[in-house]
Image: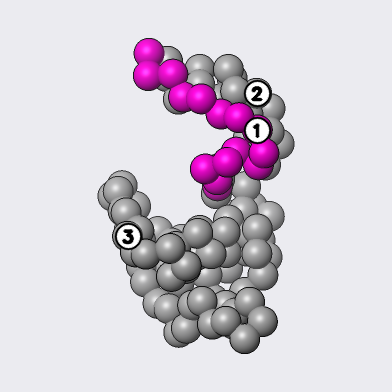
């Protein structure tokens, strides 16, 4: 379970997330919907540890997520642009095969 409590993030004077709290339960699929610039990607990057929060807390199974290497190793974030790598998902392959094909398998094993 991922739990976010009173999360805040700003970029300069632009407040992106303000006092966000939510709980994502295990074995469920969630979607983030909203217009451009409302904080969807920022939230995912904060959970993955790619951004530093201004304040608030993020937990994985009731343990602090971001500052805990054991927990951060369980979270993966692959942005749409694939960190600058052109990633094409092939429908006929499994997720593992796709990650190997795109060269991300080694990256995911290390992180």
Farthest residue, direction front: 36
SS category of the residue bearing label 3: loop
Disc 2 versus disc 1: distance between alpha carbons?
A: 9 Å
Instruction: Please identify the quarter of the rendering in which residue 85 is found.
Output: top right
SS category of the residue bearing label 2: loop
Position of residue 80 relative to residue 87, above or below, is below
Q: How would you rate the neighbour count of disc 2 (Cα within 10 Å): few for under 14, some for 14-19, many for 20 or more?
A: few
**Horizontal and vertical percent position of residue 90:** 44, 18
Q: Main secondary structure of the magenta part?
A: loop
Residue at point 68%, 27% (across, down):
106
Which numbered marker is on residue 103? 2
Q: Is residue 85 magenta?
A: yes
Closer to the N terminus: mark 3 or mark 2? 3
Range drawn in magenta: 77-92
Residue beneath disc 3:
33
Is residue 102 among what the camera can see? yes
Cβ atoms under marks 3 and 1 closer than 8 Å: no
Residue beneath disc 1:
85
**Horizontal and vertical percent position of residue 9:** 57, 77
Task: Name the quadrant of the C terminus.
Answer: top right
Cβ atoms under marks 2 and 1 closer than 8 Å: yes
Position of residue 59 relative to residue 74, above or below, is below
């Amino acid at each position: 379970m991922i739990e976010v409590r009173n999360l805040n993030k700003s970029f300069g004077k632009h407040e992106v997330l303000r006092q966000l709290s939510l709980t994502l339960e295990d074995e469920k699929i969630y979607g983030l919907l909203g217009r451009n610039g409302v904080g969807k990607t920022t939230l995912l990057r904060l959970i993955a540890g790619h951004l530093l929060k201004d304040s608030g807390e993020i937990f994985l199974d009731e343990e602090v997520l971001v500052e805990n290497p054991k927990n951060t190793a369980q979270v993966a974030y692959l942005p749409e642009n694939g960190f600058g790598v052109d990633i094409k998902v092939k429908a006929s392959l499994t997720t593992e095969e796709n990650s190997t094909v795109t060269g991300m398998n080694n990256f995911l094993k290390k992180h």
